[in-house]
Image (cartoon, helix red, strand yellow):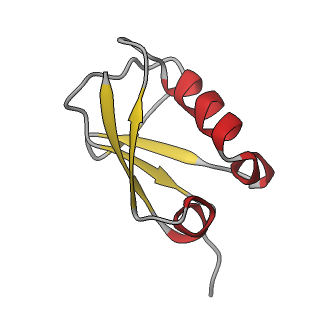
C-alpha cells in the first residue's frame, strides 16, 4: 500500500522533503514503518525520539496502518 507521510523539522531536513510517498506492506505496524524509514534514512535512527501521528492522534508502535491514513513524523522539539 502507498502511504503519504508528512515530515516536520529535522525529519524534513533528513529526508529532503516535507512529504514522503512510501510503499509499505498492507497492515504495516507503526513500528514496522519506523524500521523501514530508518533503513532508508539512517539519520532518523540518531534522533533522541520520534513520534508518529496517525489521523491526528499519537500512535502506538503496534497500531496498524491503512492506505488512507494521515501519517506524520513528529521529531523531538526543543525551545523555551
Residue shown at 60% from the left, 30% from the top = 36
> Residue 31 lies in what quarter of the image?
top right
Using the rendered view, name the quadrant where residue 54 is placed.
top left
The number of numbered discs placed on residues in the rendered structure image is 0
| Percent position of residue 47, x then y | 74, 55
**Quadrant housing residue 1:** top left
Comparing 77 with 41, the one in front is 41
Judged from this view, the residue extending furthest toward the left is 68
Closest to the observer, 73 or 38? 38
User: Which residue occupies 27% across, 22% down?
Assistant: 66
At x 26% / y 42%, what residue is drawn?
70
Task: Please state if 30 lies on the left or on the right of 44 as rendered.
Answer: left
| Residue 68: image location, x then y, percent | 19, 31
| Whether residue 65 is situated above or below residue 16 in the rendered picture | above
Looking at the image, residue 66 lies above or below residue 3:
above
Quadrant where the C terminus is found in the figure: bottom right
Q: In this view, does 53 lie above or below 78?
A: above
Residue 77 image position (x, y, % from top left): 60, 69
In the displayed orientation, state which residue is furthest to the bottom: 80
Is 64 drawn above or below residue 48 in the view shown?
A: above
For the point 65% across and 29% down, the residue is: 35
Amino acid at each position: 500500500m502507498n502511504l503519504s507521510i508528512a515530515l516536520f523539522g529535522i525529519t524534513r531536513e533528513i529526508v529532503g522533503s516535507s512529504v514522503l510517498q512510501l510503499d509499505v506492506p498492507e497492515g504495516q505496524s507503526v513500528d514496522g514503518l519506523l524500521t523501514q524509514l530508518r533503513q532508508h534514512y539512517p539519520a532518523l535512527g540518531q534522533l533522541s525520539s520520534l513520534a508518529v501521528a496517525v489521523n491526528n492522534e499519537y500512535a502506538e508502535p503496534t497500531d496498524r496502518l491503512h492506505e488512507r491514513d494521515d501519517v506524520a513524523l513528529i521529531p523531538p522539539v526543543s525551545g523555551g
